[in-house]
Image (spheres, rainbow, N blue to C red):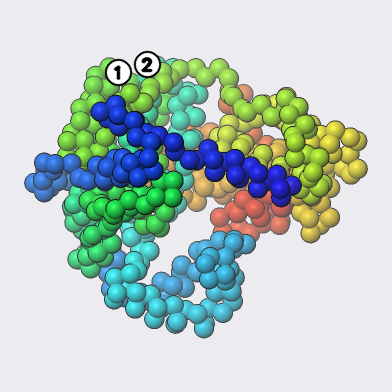
Amino acid sequence: MAAELRAEENRNAAKRHIACVTLPDKRTVTTSAGICEAFRLYFQDLFTREPGLSSAQFDAYLADFPCLEAAEAARCEGPITESEIWDALKQVGLDKSPGLDGLPYEVYLRLSPVFVPLLQLIYNHWMRQGLYLDASPGLVLSRLIGPEQTCAVKGRTIQDNLHMVRLILEQVDSEAALINLDQSKAFDRVDHRFLEAVLSAAGFGADFRSWIRLLYATPGALVEVNGVRSEPFVLSRSIRQGCPLSPLLYVLALEPFLRKLKANPVLRGITLPGATTSARYSAYADDVSALVSSRAEIDEVSKEISGYEMVTGARINRDKSVGLRLGAWKEFLFPDLSSGRMGRSRYSARLSLKGRAEVCVSHIYPILLYRLSVLPLPYARLMQLVRTLFSFLWRGKAPMVSRDVCCLHPSEGGLGMPSIEIRQYMLRITFLDRMCRGSNEEGAFWKEDVQKHFPSLKSVHSCEQEAGRLPRAECSFYRECRRALKLLLRVSDGLSNAQALSRKALYQVLVRGPFKMI
């Protein structure tokens, strides 16, 4: 196996070698130095700000941008306190791989009385050197970023966007369209001066803005192609991807454009039948979709795009931006995992029983996760998928133990195989739990529809009334939510009422409950 993997890596390395490039003037370059220089010129042009952008344009475009209160802005100023470090440690996830220091979070939590004072000294030293930024900006983003943008804001997830689109596809019968706006090099085209203007308009203090200015004062880069490195060049735009601050800074830079869409009186967006909340757009970082219901609105979106491009230097790739006509949704599509190829995989014969179970958990289930979170898997397809998974597990032979045992945690004698049906119920319960615990503003579009179907649901821990209701005209997603609530009532003694439900803890309780695997 090791030799095969090394050979595959060598083949991939050969594929990555660039033999030649064609320049804009149609000349072909074949030398490594010439290829490297061609890439350097391309990226230098990409990371150089557009000429003609001015502070006056920025200020006019940001005139109606919301501003933080003085107390909120102060949270991003001053030295790091011990209480902030304590709060950050309490929010981290456990059972995660350690960082570069090799210490998992559990060590910091267990020895927090020793570590917290030391971390405070280190962080404040870095701040004085201009090398560290507090995580506090994330705590005030919800005041500046509209609820339709779900990236980098605590309490929001991409599930909000998915449920919004699901509801629109299921319920909207009138003329409407969803236009996905493809942004060309979205993070790379953020102008540093425009970003600073946004931070100033938002009311961030001088200290915080000076830290950002220091990070992006004289950034440089170079290109390495085929082992040859180019001369360095200066970056006057782009946001560093991979930095924890990058998504926060990007959504702040994009928010002025999204607010223009929301404030435009011509853009009415889409409203569900019988609802009062409309949706004009959906956004997750640079993935923006405008929701329109007339030709005039499409033209207005195009005008707002042109204004945004002119002021900021951003570019919407109109050739790759696509529209989807909305109406009745006839069929939900899931990936076909039942063609028999899993059982004939060239790795199947070399994997142990535990290895095949790990493939199901780590590689197959994640493919389904996002689809399962918003779309109920039809029962026939569910049965087909389960048969395929267990056929792969046992190499097409008769199973040695029951599926119930296979789905138990390894510490309980199982293999940790995913129970797709119980995982569906787990996703529905956590969906309803978010609806009950979240603020009214977050995900308002889909929450209004959920509350219409579950009017008396205040907590998933006291759901007897809603679990017993069986409305006739209800979509399959909500019917599955009710079945999940019924199952939860049978195992609720093993769950805490005080905290939001953890997917991992909820799944372990459900899989041990009085439920027969299919």
Label 1 sits on what residue type? Ser
| Cα distance in 3D space between marks 2 and 1 | 7 Å
Q: Is residue 242 left or right of residue 370?
A: left
In the rendered structure, are the residues bearing label 2 and label 1 in contact, judged by CB atoms less than 8 Å apart? yes
138 or 470: nearer the eye? 138
Instruction: Say which residue appears at 84% left-offset and 55% top-offset.
Output: 413
Q: Is residue 315 left or right of residue 419?
A: left
Rendered location of residue 71, percent (x, y): 26, 66
Q: Which residue is mark 2?
A: 175
Instruction: Label 2: state its secondary structure.
Output: loop
Q: Is residue 339 above or below residue 145?
A: above
Rendered location of residue 259, percent (x, y): 25, 40
Count of residue discs:
2
- Quadrant housing the C terminus: top right
Rendered location of residue 27, percent (x, y): 30, 29
Instruction: Label 1: state its secondary structure.
Output: loop
Quarter holding residue 412? bottom right
Q: Is residue 514 left or right of residue 225?
A: right
Rendered location of residue 56, percent (x, y): 8, 46
- Mark 2 or mark 1: which comes first in sequence? 2
How many residues crowd around disc 1 within 10 Å: few (fewer than 14), some, or many (20 or more)?
Answer: some
Name the disc covering residue 294, or none.
Answer: 1
Q: Is residue 419 visible?
A: no
